[in-house]
Amino acid sequence: MRVRPAAHLVNAAYISKYTRAVQLMKQLPATDPRNFMQQANVHCAYCNAAYEQVGFKTEIQVHASWLFFPWHRLYLYFYERILGSLIGDPFFALPFWNWDAPDGMRMPSMYTANPTTSSIFDRLRDARHQPPKLMDLNFNGTDLNLPDSQLIQNNLSTVQVVSNSTAQLFLGMPYRAGNRPDPGAGSIERVPHNTVHDWIGDPTSRFRENMGNFYSAARDPIFFAHHANVDRMWSIWSEFGRTYTDPDWLNASFLFYDENRNLVRATVRDALTISQLRYSYQGVPILWTSARP
Ligand code: C2O
């Protein structure tokens, strides 16, 4: 079992293991499908109209529909296995950015430390949002400069949608073979998923690279900590017993490269629970269930 730790709680030993794994990924030959840029391009391939749906003249897009949560869960799953295999640690687990808790509402410092040498630092980030700047999960391009206590309260109530959403509201709208992309994103995908992407991306770079654009987002290692927490929200929401059971959702499948460089196909059905994928999240206090909107 792999246990994903909260990014703001990890120790130095974890950070050195993690940064070493990412560094090894970056050092792989550019043609190796496990290579860092190749892996970032897997994200790009599933969201920038790179491919058409099999048998249709319609692009495949994994955002803004019910494919959002399962696709990203599987993407992280294979990514994590690749990192673990590069350092010979079958229990290696990605960190999660605990932005739903006050102590985690900052860019985790390990991602901003040692700019010249760290494999998980990224230059293309909003300079105004470096730690200890508190995050605004509802960021819309402008910093509101609210008092910290107010911002924390707003952030907590934003995450509250997790506890009272239906499958359509939470997971996003149905998107079946032949459908046009973007039938509608779920609540968490829109906010804080999209807003945190924009909060990190560099506003002085042309397309708000890296995090502020699909094509480049996974070039920033912080992407994976952000998405681990998005995935954790799905796992918490699932505990309320809600899900889609539509076969078009369950049988939707995607291709990824595994840690042995094999191309493998995985379905939504394979990714319904984190326990079937043999990982879990470190237990941390959850304050948003009682936050006032
Ligand atoms: Cu595929 Cu956070 O985007």
Image (cartoon, rainbow, N blue to C red):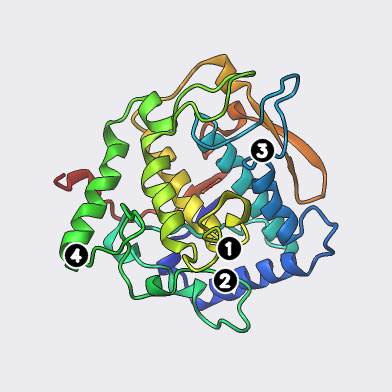
Does residue 276 appear in the picture of this structure? Answer: no
Measure the C-alpha gap from mark 3 to mark 2. 25 Å
Hey, what amino acid is under mark 1? Asp
**In the rendered image, which residue does mark 4 sit on?**
146
Residue 253, picture quadrant: top right
Residue under label 2: 122
Lower sequence index among marks 3 and 2: 3
Distance from disc 1 to disc 4, alpha carbons, whole Å, reads: 28 Å
Q: Are marks 3 and 4 in contact (CB under 8 Å)?
A: no
Q: Is residue 16 above or below residue 231?
A: below
Quick check: 273 above or below 248? below
Q: Is residue 279 above or below residue 162?
A: below
The CB of the residue at mark 1 lies under 8 Å from ligand 1 = no
Residue neighbourhood size for the residue with mark 2, other residues' Cα within 10 Å, grouped as few (<14), some (14–19), many (≥20):
some
User: SS for tag 2?
Assistant: loop
Q: Which residue is mark 3?
A: 49
